[in-house]
Image (spheres, rainbow, N blue to C red):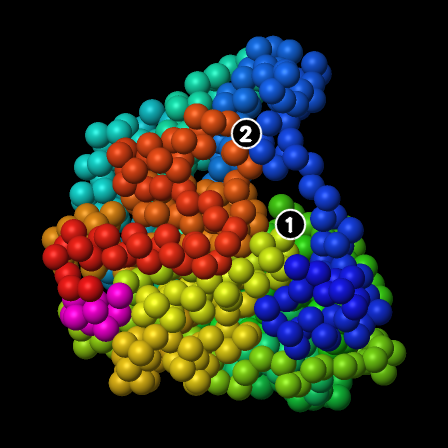
Amino acid sequence: MSCISCKMCESADKKLESFVASKDVETAFHRTEDQKVKCGFGLQGVCCRLCANGPCRITPKSPRGICGADADTIVARNFLRAVASGAACYLHVVENTARNLKKLGESKGVIKGEKTIDELAQIFEIEANDRHEKCIKVAQKVLDDLYKARDEKMELVEKIAYTPRVKKWKEIGIMPGGAKSEVFDAIVKSSTNLNSDPVDMLINCLNLGISTGLYGLTLTNLLNDVILGEPVIRTAPVGFRVIDKDYINIMITGHQHSTFAHFQDRLKDEEIVNLAKKAGAKGFRLVGCTCVGQDLQLRGEHYQEVFEGHAGNNFTSEAVLSTGAIDMIASEFNCTIPGIEPIADKYKVKMICLDDVAKKVNAEYVPFDRENIELITDRLINEALQSYKSRRGEVEIDIPSDHGHDVSLTGVSEKNLKAFLGDSWKPLINLIAEGKIKGIAAVVGCSNMTAKGHDVFTVELTKELIKRDIIVLSAGCSTGGLENVGLMSPGAEDLAGENLREVCKSLGIPPVLNFGPCLAIGRLEIVATQIANELGIDIPQLPLVLSAPQWLEEQALADGAFGLALGLPLHLALPPFITGGKLVTEILTEKLKDITGGQVIVDSDVISSADTLEKIVIDRREKLGLKE
Ligand code: SF4
Ligand code: FE2
């Protein structure tokens, strides 16, 4: 995984790799090499430092910690804590999004997704006089559920989840209570000398997965659709070519797109563009990085004047700054890696942080508050202008304009994909039934540096799956990697198997469909639910597999727990720090199949991972009576 000539980690994106190698900056590509010797105890999840008797490390000769906790207890506690943290991150996002929607309703702001608010009001069985009242009531319903006590079940779960799944979750006893209380108690449960039952803790992970998935993922997308506009399928440029030195470039990072809604709208206004012109620029441009950039790209149809595309994922952001063309960073959540801080200093880039949960050490904190939105937007515009004026001419600008692609398909959602197919899932189902498409793989989640290098596993696995006529739906930083190497651009269909290639050519689509940010894993859940419903089967019967090959953060583990609760096979190229617990590993990789239908598959080899996923798809086709 290392580039021998320069002692750097490799990327699937060779132009990015050579750009990073050409710059005098330290990035994650360099640090990966320095950190390549891993702690074996940490990797297996058998290091515990929950109390002052520790850290205890489990070995064959010392199978219990000082308190008596065995490997499975320690692994399960560590795993539950990680899933709870990941759930908390997504719940923070949906909580803020719901609050923003509520305030939009109260202030009678512009509703961009009228259809979505009508649908949500209908699903939630809300009566209201107008759409603004619907926004308030829909948002309140979401918030009420988040704030319920642990023994009060969340109301909306039954309204938004697939009925056969709800039935299964009730049978197993994993219907979630108030989401924030559930996170709180998971922390209690996994503290020292409390719960020691690995099975109980793993079941708890599933429950956290459900609230993460349905609220943090699915609902966040839909609330954002109301605030920011529904995605529209279109093509857009991707990669460093979206950065134009003639503009004031603002890099945005995080996951809370609704935070930027007003700012984004305002940048289009003539008086604001004139301010940029007076400073010597052509206007303002938002440069998307990380998932919020993916979400911007997804909804780009509504914001074409200020946004051209997505530059790259989390581990591309250091390189984006090294172009010298970014004038300000506005961040609001995770995947804003600390590595950007010294590079921002070197290139004199102003850093603004809008949410203190993601306060960066050299960023100025501007607390986001929708009530003072005009002031905050003015402040951001002013800071960007000042930064542009003070740094241009002082720093070298070097944008690799051949990086990325001019035409990449984006903007795919559960709604517009169905509409594209003729307002029905039947054409897709027929293609699957005829074997033109063997099955569906959701290749989702993060980008990391350690599964063969930056995006290497994700790209290689995706190529292997499409070669086998399995269509890939993508959401998350993985999408950033896949689009930057051209897998959503014209010509990508030539990498697909004969049957899938034919489908792509006749429909005019690439073999990898871009659903945008990791939050859009919730959109994929809607797709799966609607297709299963159309067929009258449960989700685990679908020829659908899930892979988060290069998972990175605790949030990804909470997403994964949702996938397992849905009953999906979940492939990971790197183990989630559980392998030291024999029972925990056995439950997640085997026994869970009989509980939810889900299963973790850990495989760090691309071909054998694709073999396993293809075999599952073929088995499910057979069970549904579909031809080979
Ligand atoms: Fe060791 Fe037990 Fe304390 Fe963990 S809780 S550090 S295993 S004594
Ligand atoms: Fe993300």
- Residue type at mark 2 is Gly
Please provide percent x and percent y for residue 377: 61, 67
Please, is residue 539 above or below residue 167 in the view? below
Q: Is residue 535 magenta?
A: no
Residue appearing at x 63%, y 56% in the figure: 449
Residue appearing at x 78%, y 51% in the figure: 34
Magenta residues span 430-438
Please, is residue 60 above or below residue 1 in the view? above
Could you say which quadrant of the image residue 289 lies in?
bottom right
The mark found on residue 580 in the picture is 2
Please provide percent x and percent y for residue 25: 81, 66
Label 1 Cα crowd, 10 Å radius (few <14 / some 14-19 / many 20+):
some
Residue positioned most to the top: 67
Q: Which residue is mark 1?
A: 358
Please, is residue 462 above or below residue 608 in the view? below
Q: Nearer the viewer, residue 150 or 240?
A: 240
Residue appearing at x 62%, y 53% in the figure: 450
Residue appearing at x 43%, y 66% in the figure: 464
- Residue type at mark 1 is Ala
Q: Quadrant of the C terminus?
A: bottom left
On the question of residue 483 being in view, the answer is: yes
